[in-house]
Amino acid sequence: MSLLRRLSNLFTRRKLDREIDAELSSHIEMRIADNIAAGMSKEAAHRDAMLRFGNRALMKERVTSADAALMFDGIARDTRYAIRRSFRSPAFALTAIVTLALGIGTNVVVFGVLNALILHPLNVAESDRLFSVVQKQHGADSQSYPDYLDFRSRNNTFSDMAGYKLYDAALSIRGVPKKSWFYEVSGNYFRMLGLRPQLGRFFDLNDEHVPNSAPYVVLSDSFWHDRFAGDPRVLGTTVEINKHPFTVIGVAPTDFHGTEVFFWPDFWVPMVNEQQINGYDYLSQRRSHGLWVIGKVRDGRR
């Protein structure tokens, strides 16, 4: 067996036991066949073979012990050799170590990306029904707010569609400002994702009437703990976003970090307050793209 196989066997004892059983059975059967060919009766041939190979459990223990001893002996021998070579050729050793470190680091990053994008989808209910809505033209991945409203009201593919944008702003707590990253989202964002707040409530479409009509904030779990020490009395607190007052009405679930895999926001605010926060009204500008849209496919349309 190779060194890697031996090391694997240490942690897969059941597999090793099955292999040893199969090997012993094979030798016993060959011995029985040889005995019968030599003129023994079937019973005598079987008895002789069993006596020659002895107790199976004891034999398995001996084989396993020998296998482990050989493995550790090989590791010790390889380690001593590597140390001697390192002292003789330090430049080569350093190059090898750096190369291995870079290779391992690259693999870790690649696996992290793979895990985030493919193996670990968004942690929301029915995430397999969520799709980004893009235009046919290559690179036209974002929409305007008027286009989003048209898509949401006229499509037959999605049961609901929500929009969001990513921004940074100065959020002040008791007069102390700090740069924060956040989502501006449509009023149906949380409802479409099937989320429930861990504290307070989410804003929704009923809170949106006209521009700047919903000065509410939903905090992320980490931001709530970092800036408010996880105090449940945070509900009703007034904070300032770019010097405009907003009221904290809820805290998102612990394991929800938005709908961008590599971007975790500090909080969410209603999109209808865009002009108040950033001083620009993209809500009425059909040519102003930059809004990301996700839709939830209707049952039976997948």
Image (cartoon, rainbow, N blue to C red):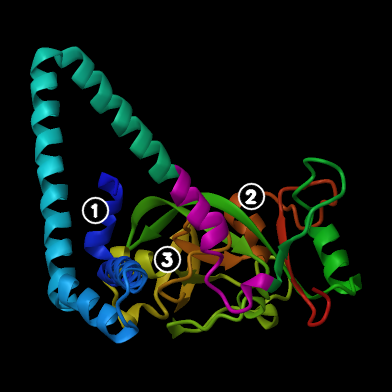
Q: To which residue does mark 1 refer?
A: 7
Residue 261 place in picture, x, y as percent: 53, 56
Image-quadrant location for residue 66: bottom left
- Name above or below for residue 177 compared with residue 296: above
Q: Secondary structure beneath disc 1?
A: helix
Q: Secondary structure beneath disc 2?
A: loop
Query: Badge 3: few (under 14), some or many (20 or more) residues near its Cα, within 10 Å?
Result: many
Name the disc covering residue 32, or none: none
Q: Secondary structure beneath disc 3?
A: strand
Residue type marked 1: Leu
Q: Residue furthest front?
A: 39
The residue depicted at 40 percent of the width and 80 percent of the height is: 235
Along the line of sight, which residue is nearer the eye, 15 or 227? Answer: 15
Looking at marks 3 and 2 on the same chain, the residue that comes earlier in the sequence is marked by 3
Q: What stretch is highlighted in magenta?
A: 110-128
- Name above or below for residue 16 compared with residue 160: above
Along the line of sight, which residue is nearer the eye, 42 or 26? Answer: 42
